[in-house]
Amino acid sequence: MFELHIGTQTLIHETVHAAQVCAGKGKIKTLGLDIQPSNYARPFFRRYTDVKRQDLEKEAYAVQTQPNSFKLAVSLLQQHCK
């Protein structure tokens, strides 16, 4: 990851998945965020055929591609993983 220069983005992406698991109390669920991923990220989550998985990934990519992605990811952990 870090050699490919995607370490930070990957950690943010996985942090969102952690918040999704906390929100689902051990079962992963979407957080209902009102943000969209960049057009660049669309092929990465659209490759999933399962709609639920696609929604989970879409949400993680949405956070990952925001200008304030780190701050947003931390706030999601704080909000959902108490």
Image: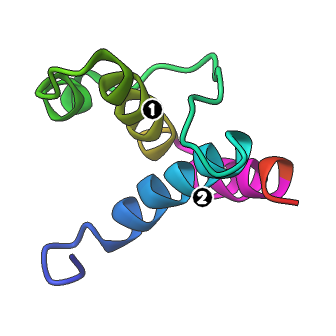
**Whether residue 44 is situated above or below residue 6 in the rendered picture:** above
Q: In the image, what residue type sits under mark 1? A: Ala
Q: In what quadrant of the picture does the N terminus appear?
A: bottom left
What span is colored magenta in the figure? 67-78
Q: Secondary structure at mark 2?
A: helix
Q: Is residue 54 magenta?
A: no
Query: What residue is shown at x 23% (from left), y 30% (from top)?
Result: 45
Q: Quadrant of residue 28?
A: top right
The image quadrant that residue 56 belongs to is: top left
Q: Can you name the residue that lies furthest to the bottom here?
A: 3
Secondary element under disc 1, as helix, strand or loop, is helix
**Residue that mark 2 sits on:** 70
From this view, report whether residue 33 is shown above or below residue 1.
Answer: above
Q: CA distance from mark 2 to mark 1?
A: 12 Å
- Residue at horizontal 45 percent and vertical 40 percent from the top: 60
The residue positioned 38% from the left and 22% from the top of the image is 52
The number of numbered badges drawn on the structure is 2
Magenta region includes residue 77? yes
Residue 34 image point, x, y percent: 63, 16
**Outermost residue, front side:** 26
Q: Earlier in the sequence, mark 2 or mark 1?
A: 1
Identity, as a three-letter code, of the amino acid under mark 2: Phe
* Residue at numbered disc 1: 62
Left or right: where 38 falls relative to 27: left
- Residue 65 x/y as whole percent: 41, 40
**32 up-or-down from 57: above or below:** above
Picture disc at residue 10: none
The percent position of residue 33, horizontal first and vertical second, equals: 64, 23
